[in-house]
Image: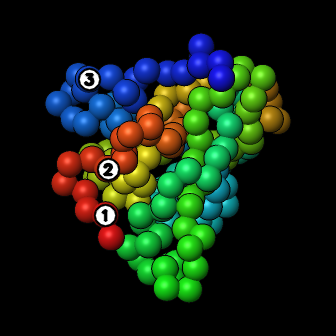
Amino acid sequence: RDTTSTPTKHWGAGSRGMHPSLEALVPGTLTILAYGALLSERSARVTFPMLSNFRLARVSGYCRVFAHPHFFLLSQNLVDRSATNRIASLSAEPASSSSGFVVAAFDVNMTPELQADFDRREPEYHFASVPYKELDSAATGTGVLCVRPPDGDSGMRPGLEMP
């Protein structure tokens, strides 16, 4: 696997006194790169009611994988564990530079409260700053993508509970 495009921001030591995986969630206007349920603007507005500039984009150097249970869905009883063992959620992980997928890109004003809400919704992910290219305009930028933690790391941050 080619990991030359792998960002290290979400796996290093935290410089702002927070868990390293939260470092990409900087205060101010921030672009979220969403896949899975957040590809729907309606679903994205549940977590980010004040989002703006909803559009489609592409990220390169990552692939989507079913990698781990989605603790938020389990904690909200949106998945009946007694009825199925199919509880893996969609995640993203570094891949070759020729890999990539379509995401929804939208802008939010990242406040400490919104950061905490997002972290509660996605406790098993790390957050990475990755480049993207918009599908309609070909404009480029950098946004935050939820990624699978490295092997051996549950992704759970101190203070967050697994259901």
Q: Are marks 1 and 2 in contact (CB under 8 Å)?
A: yes
Q: Relative to 75, is 101 on the left or the right?
A: right
Rendered image: mark on residue 156: 2
Which label's residue is closer to the chain start, 1 or 3?
3
Give residue 45's position: percent from left, percent from top: 54, 62
| Residue 98 at x, y percent in the picture | 78, 23
Q: CA distance from mark 1 to mark 2?
A: 8 Å
Picture disc at residue 162: 1
Residue sitting farthest toward the right: 136
Locate residue 136: give its quadrant.
top right
Give the crowd class for mark 2: few <14, some 14-19, many >=20 residues within 10 Å. some
Q: Is residue 8 left or right of residue 3?
A: left
Residue 50's place in the image compared with 56, above or below, is below
51 vs 72, nearest the viewer: 72
Q: CA distance from mark 1 to mark 3?
A: 23 Å
Q: Quadrant of residue 5?
A: top right
Local SS, label 3: loop
Residue that numbered label 3 is attached to: 13
Please tell me which of labels 1 and 2 falls first in the chain.
2
Which of the image's four quarters has the N terminus? top right
Q: Is residue 120 left or right of residue 102?
A: left
Kindly give the residue lying farthest to the top in the view shown: 4
